[in-house]
């Protein structure tokens, strides 16, 4: 009886604490470090190198949250007597979540959880020592929020060349360093159905009182979910339930920014309620067209980035954690801006630079410029993912034969197209009051 009473007390204590139930892996890109200066980058979906201006990188979570399992991997060792320290910053302050890669090592990690307050700007800081080798750093962190029904999308733009557009688009999932004036290049393809219930915005405060408006777009069209921020305030939100945006599988989400004042650097955060709980998203958008003659590679998770010719430049780092079931990738949904004029493109998810069964094709014979594939690919801690696009030419026979009487075969390359992709993931979280 005494043992039963003790167990009851422990159970009541745990349920009296704030319980964190929804676990996401926040993937980074694969970013080039600063060798001699302190550098900063997006926490999620880094699409360019570390920059000395930390004010560019503004991503935040509109909920209380727990961060855990911060891990960093380098493309090469810093070198003997050299090191690189990586730290997660929240609200302009270094957190305890920090680790250092030194000498001939290739990775570091920090496992204990830390709590993050509502709306704090999050980013990663990198501090070199001894002029380490010029390397790429990929990192990831596990984000846990209170509700197992909500998915938090964090996006942002960190423009490196100052421009003054009259409009701009911001990817809602991951970061970009490109000024995006074409809505298709900022889209997050949703591989499941659900609702966007809230829009939140954060940008560096200015001194004026000019307005700027942010609007959630569905399939490239305006919705009623919108908010207007003033330059010297730097934030706005739309949490009106009447403005929630319902979306179907394969539809796209982006954020549109317009007004008298367009901030160069903005963070956006969307609260999404998928129709199926424990559903997560990894998405990418290509800010350049894929090649019709050569393979191209892209991050598994990024807001918008140029397709890369070298696969080792773009892997993103996976993690799982304490889950009640294995973490899995369940589907891939790919969209292009047009059907290629000839031939086809094979789009494949790669794990540790090896092709997986997640592969589909968009060809000149396709009815629509999209394709989809389903499966169940288990995610292991330390796996690295990227996307490969392979062009396949179409064989053509000219109307006139060759002089020797034989037929002349010509391989026509498919026309270059823009490609976006979204992945449905599942990380079923144990409901614990304390996250390890």
Image: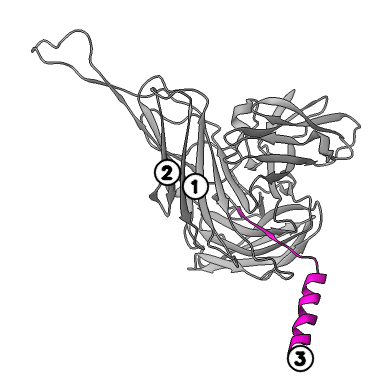
Q: Which is more N-terminal, label 1 or label 3?
A: 3
As for residue 23 lying within the magenta part, the answer is yes
Horizontal side of 325 relative to 156 (left or right) equals left
User: Mark 2 sits on what residue?
Assistant: 310
Q: Farthest residue toward the left? A: 404
Whether residue 10 is situated above or below residue 77 in the rendered picture: below
Q: Which is more N-terminal, label 2 or label 3?
A: 3
User: Mark 3 sits on what residue?
Assistant: 1
Residue 163 can be seen, yes or no? no
Q: Nearer the viewer, mark 3 or mark 1?
A: 3
Tell me the magenta residue range.
Answer: 1-26
How far apart are labels 3 and 2 at the CA level?
65 Å
User: Mark 1 sits on what residue?
Assistant: 314
* Crowd around label 3: few <14 · some 14–19 · many ≥20 (10 Å): few
Q: Is there a contact, CB below 8 Å, between mark 3 and mark 1?
A: no
User: Is the C terminus in the top left, top right, bottom left or bottom right quadrant?
Assistant: bottom right
Horizontal side of 49 relative to 237 (left or right) equals left
Whether residue 244 is situated above or below residue 72 in the rendered picture: above
Residue 2 can be seen, yes or no? yes
Residue 17 on image: x %, y % = 81, 70
Q: Which mark is residue 223?
A: none
Q: Is there a contact, CB below 8 Å, between mark 1 and mark 2?
A: yes
**Looking at the rendering, which quadrant does residue 110 occupy?**
bottom right
Residue 283 on image: x %, y % = 57, 42
How far apart are labels 1 and 2 at the CA level?
8 Å
Task: Residue at 81% x, 30% y: name it.
Answer: 213
The answer to which of 42 and 208 lies nearer the viewer is: 42
Task: Residue at 80% x, 81% y: name it.
Answer: 9
Task: Determine the secondary structure under disc 2.
Answer: loop
Whether residue 214 is situated above or below residue 349 in the rendered picture: above
């Amino acid at each position: 009886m005494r043992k039963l009473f003790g167990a009851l007390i422990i159970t009541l204590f745990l349920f009296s604490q704030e319980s964190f139930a929804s676990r996401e892996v926040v993937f980074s890109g694969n970013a080039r470090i600063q060798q001699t200066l302190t550098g900063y980058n997006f926490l999620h979906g880094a699409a360019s190198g570390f920059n000395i201006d930390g004010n560019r990188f503004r991503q935040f979570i509109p909920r209380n949250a727990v961060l855990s399992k911060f891990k960093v991997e380098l493309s090469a060792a810093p070198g003997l007597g050299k090191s690189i320290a990586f730290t997660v910053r929240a609200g302009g302050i270094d957190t305890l979540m920090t680790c250092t890669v030194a000498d001939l090592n290739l990775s570091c990690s920090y496992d204990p959880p830390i709590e993050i307050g509502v709306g704090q700007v999050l980013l990663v800081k990198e501090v070199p020592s001894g002029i380490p080798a010029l390397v790429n750093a990929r990192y990831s962190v596990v984000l846990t929020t209170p509700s197992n029904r909500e998915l938090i999308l964090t996006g942002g733009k960190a423009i490196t060349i100052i421009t003054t557009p009259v409009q701009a688009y911001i990817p809602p999932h991951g970061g970009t360093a490109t000024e995006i004036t074409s809505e298709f290049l900022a889209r997050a393809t949703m591989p499941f159905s659900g609702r966007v219930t809230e829009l939140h915005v954060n940008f560096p405060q200015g001194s004026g009182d000019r307005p700027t408006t942010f609007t959630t777009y569905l399939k490239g069209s305006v919705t009623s979910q919108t908010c207007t921020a003033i330059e010297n305030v730097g934030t706005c939100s739309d949490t009106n339930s009447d403005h929630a945006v319902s979306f179907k599988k394969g539809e796209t989400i982006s954020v549109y920014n317009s007004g008298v004042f367009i901030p160069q650097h903005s963070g956006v955060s969307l609260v999404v309620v998928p129709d199926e709980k424990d559903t997560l998203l990894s998405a990418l958008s290509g800010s350049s067209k894929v090649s019709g003659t050569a393979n191209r590679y892209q991050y598994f998770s990024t807001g918008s980035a140029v397709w890369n010719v070298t696969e080792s430049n773009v892997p993103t780092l996976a993690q799982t954690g304490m889950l009640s079931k294995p973490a899995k990738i369940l589907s891939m949904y790919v969209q292009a801006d047009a059907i290629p004029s000839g031939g086809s493109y094979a789009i494949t998810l790669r794990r540790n630079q090896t092709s997986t069964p997640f592969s589909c094709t968009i060809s000149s014979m396709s009815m629509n410029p999209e394709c989809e594939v389903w499966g169940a690919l288990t995610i292991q801690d330390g796996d690295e993912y990227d996307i490969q696009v392979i062009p396949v030419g179409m064989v053509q026979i000219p109307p006139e034969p060759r002089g020797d009487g034989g037929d002349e075969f010509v391989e026509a390359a498919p026309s270059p197209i823009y490609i976006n992709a979204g992945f449905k993931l599942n990380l079923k979280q144990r409901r614990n009051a304390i996250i390890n």
